[in-house]
Image (cartoon, grey):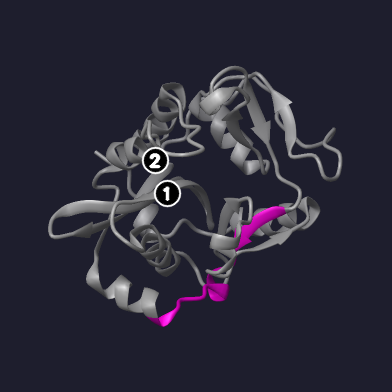
Amino acid sequence: MPIEPPPTQWHLDLGQARPGDDLVGVGADLEPGTLLAAYRSGIFPMGLGVRGGGTLGWWSPDPRGLLHPRDLRVSRSLRRAHARFDYRVDSAFDRVVAECAAPGRQGRWITPAIAGAYGELHRLGWAHSVETWQGGELVGGLYGVAIGGLFAGESMFHRATDASKAALVHLVSLVSADHGLIDVQWRTEHLASLGVTEVRRTAYLGLLADALAQPLPPAFAGVPR
């Protein structure tokens, strides 16, 4: 099972957040205990500066993008693509994060500090990668944080057509169809085509509480070595 780190020194909650505000705090740190406390409260970090640099911001989008596993929509073309790939969990976590942080990516926000912080969460058993492989090559994947029945997705990448979408489809197969919750932060048209919806923050926090009370899926229950 994952290793619980020392608790954070920061007070992280949404008591002062106003409806419709996405940015709910600034500062603090990226220690494992801080990150876990944030996710358990419905909050995640992203820098406020160019390409994720500068002051650390803490976000809780209102509305929030999420995917209920039973709502996943898989087109016929994606179903065919999904069958062409192989899938692994946590075999190349650092590589997945590096691909998501690649300098040429539009809108990139993953800094070395963020990559290092999630690498430490991975070594403690909380952060995981779902990877798409083809011909022995890593061609796509995603990473995020798993706590109970919650999988909080952080970023995804692809080097082959539909490889990131296929990774999401595989992720859905790993979580509980009844009580699992996949947090995607913000809904986009691309994600909406896969079944992602959005709810107000108050509704999300209720769903989050239920998901956190669920057992961790077996695929994420081990501590990577």
Tell me the quarter of the picture where residue 135 sits: bottom left
Q: Residue at x 55, y 61 (%)?
A: 191
Q: Is residue 129 visible?
A: yes
Q: Amino acid at mark 1?
A: Met
Residue 103, given in percent of the width and then of the height, sits at: 38, 31
- The residue that disc 2 covers is 100
Query: Which part of the image, by quadrant, shows the C terminus?
Result: top left
Q: Residue at x 63, y 25 (%)?
A: 48
Answer whether labels 2 and 1 touch (C-beta < 8 Å).
Answer: yes
Tell which residue pokes out farthest to the bottom in this image: 76
Establish if 60 lies above or below 194. Answer: above
Is 27 included in the stretch rendered in magenta? no
Element type at mark 2: helix
Q: Amino acid at mark 2?
A: Cys
Query: Is 86 positioned to the left or the right of 214 in the image?
Result: left
Query: Is the residue marked by circle 1 packed among few (<14), some (14-19), or many (20+) residues within 10 Å?
Result: many
The numbered mark, 2 or 1, whose residue comes first in the sequence reads 2
What is the magenta range? 64-76
Tell me the quarter of the picture where residue 131 sits: bottom left
Tell me the quarter of the picture where residue 54 sits: top right
- The residue that disc 1 covers is 156
Residue 74, given in percent of the width and then of the height, sits at: 46, 76
